Amino acid sequence: MDCWKVKKLQVQNFRNLNKDVFDFSSGINCIFGQNGNGKTNLLEAIYLLTNKKSFRKNTSYSQMINIEGASPEMILQSVFESNDKQVSYSLRMTDGLEERYLNNTFEKSKTVSTSVFINPFDSYLFHTSSTFRRQWFDSHLSLINKEFKQVLGRFQKAIKFRNSVLGIGGKNTSTQLQAIDEQVAEYSSFLTQKRYDFLQELNQHITPTFKAIFSEEHRLQLDLDSMFVHWDKKKVFDFYRHQEPNDIKAHITQVGIHRDDFIFSFDGLNAFEFCSLGQQKMAFLSLIFAYIELFRYKFTSYPIVLIDDVSGELDSQRWKNLIQYLETKSFQVLITTANENFGKELEKIPNSKKFLIEHGTLINHE
Ligand SMILES: Nc1ncnc2c1ncn2[C@@H]1O[C@H](COP(=O)(O)OP(=O)(O)OP(=O)(O)O)[C@@H](O)[C@H]1O
Ligand SMILES: [Mg+2]
């Protein structure tokens, strides 16, 4: 199977980045630069090309287009390579219009590759917020399972509609709910099973991945915290019928898989309650790299790995562990840092390409 890597990238009118041509290595690429100079913007451009949306929450064309640019058009042009094959891929965006071209031919929706974005600041949110955890698992499962993504979208619409019916109230509420609950039950049963299966698959990779990166033996385990596990649609439907009087009184759907949670345990104890911040970050990084291994297992090719300033909270030994791990892998990595000490470790990676970005401009690369 092909493993497409981004070889060249040029952006026009995208955030603060200039029109420089980035010529990437198919291995490790280190992006240096001080705060606010454009490192994360560069990762965002690649993510946008490969995943068709930004990793930044609530961002749209109007935030992405260069505020000082004269043209209302934003263009990302790239060349991807796999073995000896090359393709060109570009994205043009104006307000309200987005077009993609593969080898200069209009492409409705396909991308050449997929990226996984690692922002270790997310570790804190992951461990403290159940909403973030749910979104993290759902979005990563959606990346590898299109059917899950579609059904999740339908479920979210159905719950929204259910809540609007409950919000309005009135004589026909019960009849309307009955019809919606048929759908909600079917989607809930399907999505819960997929979430459950996803965790079982991740669990096979997560403990070995932690050991492979940090050379320490710890047992990491993910569990789904849901009352709906292994419930068929009839059982979920009966549950909603039983819940109806409570929901009508509360004017909202009080219980459901939209509120389910995930438990991450470290040697049998809840990682959030038990682990130090550094250990939480190590556990979170192991989860993401376990996901990357699962991705490869499913598609026999790796995604592109975008790592945004990983250095905080990890000590220098852990940095070295992580860098050594990246060196053993065949995926393409873009790793940024504003931290001079971590930068010095990155500088030592043989055969990696180094880029320095200042005020959105590529100063040098080697
Ligand atoms: N639409 C835009 N047009 C022009 N500049 C923008 C736009 N959106 C964001 N910026 C600028 O991009 C810069 C931020 O870039 P980025 O987030 O890539 O920085 P960084 O190098 O990753 O910094 P840090 O090390 O702090 O994470 C900010 O100075 C911001 O003002
Ligand atoms: Mg940044």
Image (cartoon, rainbow, N blue to C red):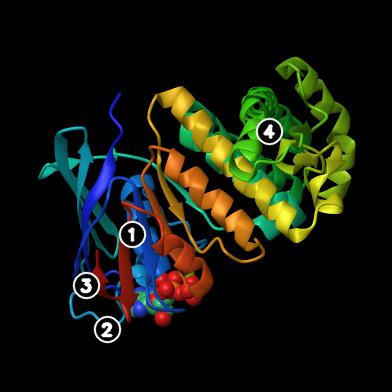
* Separation (CA) of disc 3 from disc 1: 17 Å
The image shows residue 3 at horizontal and vertical percentages of: 31, 33
Q: Which residue is mark 3?
A: 72
Q: Which residue is mark 4?
A: 207
For marks 4 and 2 on the same chain, the one whose residue lies earlier in the sequence: 2
Quadrant of res 125: bottom right
The image shows residue 139 at horizontal and vertical percentages of: 55, 42
Asked whether 216 or 171 is in front, the reply is 216
Asked whether 4 or 93 is in front, the reply is 4
Which residue is drawn at the image coordinates 51% and 67% (left, top)? 342
Q: Is residue 364 above or below residue 121?
A: below
Mark 4 lies on a secondary structure that is: helix
Return the residue found at the far left: 104
Whether residue 224 sits left or right of residue 330 in the image: it is right
For marks 1 and 4 on the same chain, the one whose residue lies earlier in the sequence: 1
Mark 1 lies on a secondary structure that is: helix
Asked whether 2 or 139 is in front, the reply is 2
Quadrant of res 166: top right
For marks 3 and 4 on the same chain, the one whose residue lies earlier in the sequence: 3
User: Does any atom of ligand 1 lie closer than 8 Å to the CB of label 2?
Assistant: yes
**Can residue 160 be seen from the camera position used here?**
no
* Separation (CA) of disc 2 from disc 3: 10 Å
Q: Which residue is mark 1?
A: 45
Foreground: disc 2 or disc 3: 2
Asked if the residues shown at circle 2 and circle 3 are in contact, with their CB atoms under 8 angstroms apart, the answer is no
Look at label 2 and name its amino acid: Glu
Q: Dot 1: few (<14), some (14–19), or many (≥20) neighbours within 10 Å?
A: many
**Can residue 17 be seen from the camera position used here?**
yes
Foreground: disc 3 or disc 1: 1
Look at label 4 and name its amino acid: Thr
